Amino acid sequence: MEVVQITAADIENGRIKDESKVADCKGHIEIEAGLGIVFASQFRAAGHIWADSGSGIEAGYSIRAGEGIKAGEDIHAGYIIKAGYGIEAGCGIKAGYGIRAGESIHAGEGIEAGCGIKAGYSIRAGESIHAGEDIHSGYIIKAGSGIKAGYGIRADYSIEAGKDIHAGEGIEAGYSIRAGEGIHAGYGIKAGEDIEAGEDIHAAFRIFAGLATSLKSPTKEQCRIRCKRLAKGEVCYGELVETSKLKEVAQ
């Protein structure tokens, strides 16, 4: 495939002078290092779109690649970011509408979309993950801070947040769900193994833990729902352990 190289000579006031170079590239787009955030109305490539260390990608409309999208700094689009392979940013990833990747979505900082975020494999952020609609991963969802979705949150393997996990609808993981703070679900919560929250759990409907079909005889730990307090919700499967009550008994 051809490679379209974007250098300092192609940039004026942070914007690509001849946007036709990146609007419908039949090969790869590669942006050299140290250019800061490079803007164009759209970036589209049959192959990959890469911005080297110290360079980021910003589109007024969309960023689309048949292969991967990678930047040393931020990746931002006013509408959609879509890659056949993975999306990786040294800083944040943000789209006004959606973010879609055939493989993983990784950001050194936060990931944010006005609508949905979907990855065939993992979704990882050093800070928060926030979507106006669904967040769906074929493997894990992991955030250094909180995870928030206007609709549901679903991972085929695990969900892990350093702070809160908050969904307007349901939260579901093939194995574990763990939050450093609280877990809040507008519908129910379902996990193949354990559920753990550093603070309270709120669920409008039912809660299930230890349902993984790969577990022949799940242990108590794999069926445990551990939190400070179950503020709302009905535990239908699993063993509830409220740490606030354990402290009361100890006293």
Image (spheres, rainbow, N blue to C red):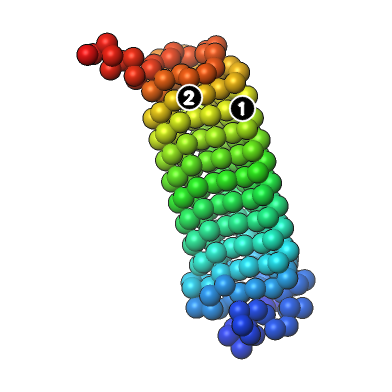
- Could you say which is closer to the camera, residue 56 or residue 104? 56
The picture quadrant where one finds residue 152 is top right
Q: Nearer the viewer, residue 126 or 131?
A: 131
* Image side of residue 217 versus residue 117, left or right: left
In which quarter of the view is residue 96 placed? Answer: bottom right
Residue 100: image location, x then y, percent: 67, 51
What is the spatial separation of the Cα atoms under label 1 and label 2, in whole angstroms? 11 Å
Q: Residue at x 63, y 68 (%)?
A: 58
Q: Amino acid at mark 1?
A: Gly
Q: Nearer the viewer, residue 161 or 157?
A: 161
At 73% from the left and 71% from the top, the residue drawn is 41
Tell how many labels: 2
Circle 2 SS class:
strand
Is 214 drawn above or below residue 133 in the view shown?
A: above
Q: Which residue is mark 1?
A: 186
The quadrant in which residue 240 appears is: top left
Residue 218 seen by the camera: no
Residue at 61% across / 74% down in the picture? Answer: 38
Relative side of 44 to 136, left or right: right
Residue 83's disc is none
Residue identifier under label 2: 201
Crowdedness of circle 2 by 10 Å Cα count: few (<14), some, many (20+)? Answer: many
Quadrant, the N terminus: bottom right
* Marks 1 and 2, the one that precedes in the sequence: 1
| Looking at the image, residue 115 lies above or below residue 64 | above
